[in-house]
Amino acid sequence: MWIKLRTGVLKVLRIVCALAVIAAVTFLYSRVCSVNSTPVALTYLLVVRAIATVWGLFEAVAIAPDG
């Protein structure tokens, strides 16, 4: 049971970290840089793909609608 609980907590922490990365990208492009929507969309795509590569499909699908 402890292993399943730990795995669930780990997935939640990964999703929270992934959402923090999306929030950081959003803050960067909205407050620091002045760009149009194309670089922002490509950056979101790269973030989701990187998370899918490193952590897996579940975390990437969880944050994909937020990006």
Image (cartoon, rainbow, N blue to C red):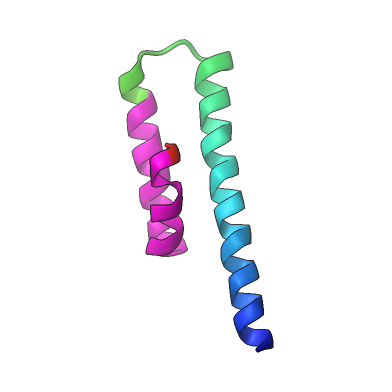
Extreme top residue here?
A: 34
In magenta, the rendered stretch is 40-65
Quarter of the figure with residue 14: bottom right
Which image quarter is the N terminus in? Answer: bottom right
As drawn, the residue found furthest toward the bottom would be 1
Q: Where is residue 21 in the image (x, y as percent from the top left)?
A: 55, 41
Question: Does 66 sit above or below residue 57?
Answer: above
The answer to whether 50 is drawn above or below residue 44 in the figure is below
Which residue extends farthest right? Answer: 2
Q: Which residue is drawn at 42% across and 36% down?
A: 67
Give the tally of numbered discs.
0
The relative height of residue 31 versus residue 11 in the rendered view (above or below) is above
- Our reading of the magenta stretch's main secondary structure is helix
In terms of depth relative to the viewer, which is nearer, 25 or 4?
Answer: 4
Q: How far across and down, in percent of the image, does residue 38 sit?
A: 30, 22
x and y percentages locating residue 17 in the rendered image: 60, 50
- Residue at 61% x, 51% y is 16
- Name the image quarter holding residue 2: bottom right
Which residue does the image show at 39% across and 34% down from the upper left?
A: 43
Height in image: 32 above or below 42? above
20 or 12, which lies in front? Answer: 12
Drawn side of residue 67 relative to residue 16, left or right = left
Could you tell me residue 15's position as x and y percent? 55, 55
Residue 4 is a magenta residue: no
Which residue lies at the image location 46% right of the left edge and 58% below the top edge? 59
Q: Tell whether 66 sits left or right of 36.
A: right
Q: In which quarter of the image is residue 4?
A: bottom right
Is 37 situated left or right of 2 in this image?
left
